[in-house]
Image: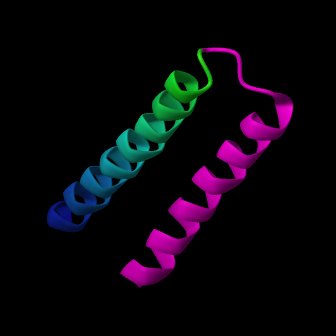
Amino acid sequence: MIYITKTRLSLLIKQTAQVGLGFLVMLLLTGGRPSEFIIGMSVVSGIGFVAWSETKRI
């Protein structure tokens, strides 16, 4: 049981870091002033990435 919890926690931390890195890259590419469209696409991409990786894991 504890192994499963540690595995899920490590996956959550890894996904959070990857999505955060994606947002950081988006901010760097836009010079810190992204448009609403870019922000929306980044959020949708982050949600899609997490959903895809979770379905791949199962």
Membership of 43 in magenta stretch: yes
Looking at the rendered image, the quarter that the C terminus falls into is bottom left
Query: Camera-side residue: 35 or 20?
Result: 35
Query: Camera-side residue: 37 or 51?
Result: 37
In the displayed structure, would residue 55 be above or below residue 43? below
Rendered image quadrant of residue 57:
bottom left
What secondary structure characterizes most of the magenta part? helix
Looking at the rendered image, the quarter that the N terminus falls into is bottom left
Q: Which residue appears farthest toward the right when viewing the image?
A: 36
Q: Which residue appears farthest toward the top when viewing the image?
A: 32
Query: Camera-side residue: 19 or 9?
Result: 19
Could you tell me which residue is drawn at 53 percent across and 62 percent down? 49
Q: Give left or right: position of 29 versus 47.
A: left
- Which range of residues does the magenta coloring cover? 32-58
Could you tell me which residue is drawn at 61 percent across and 14 percent down? 32
Could you tell me which residue is drawn at 52 percent across and 61 percent down? 50
- State the image coordinates of residue 48 (x, y, percent, origin top left): 62, 63
- State the image coordinates of residue 2 (x, y, percent, origin top left): 18, 60
In the displayed structure, would residue 45 be above or below residue 38? below
Membership of 39 in magenta stretch: yes
Rendered image quadrant of residue 56:
bottom left
Query: Camera-side residue: 44 or 26?
Result: 26
In the displayed structure, would residue 29 be above or below residue 8? above
- State the image coordinates of residue 52 (x, y, percent, origin top left): 53, 73
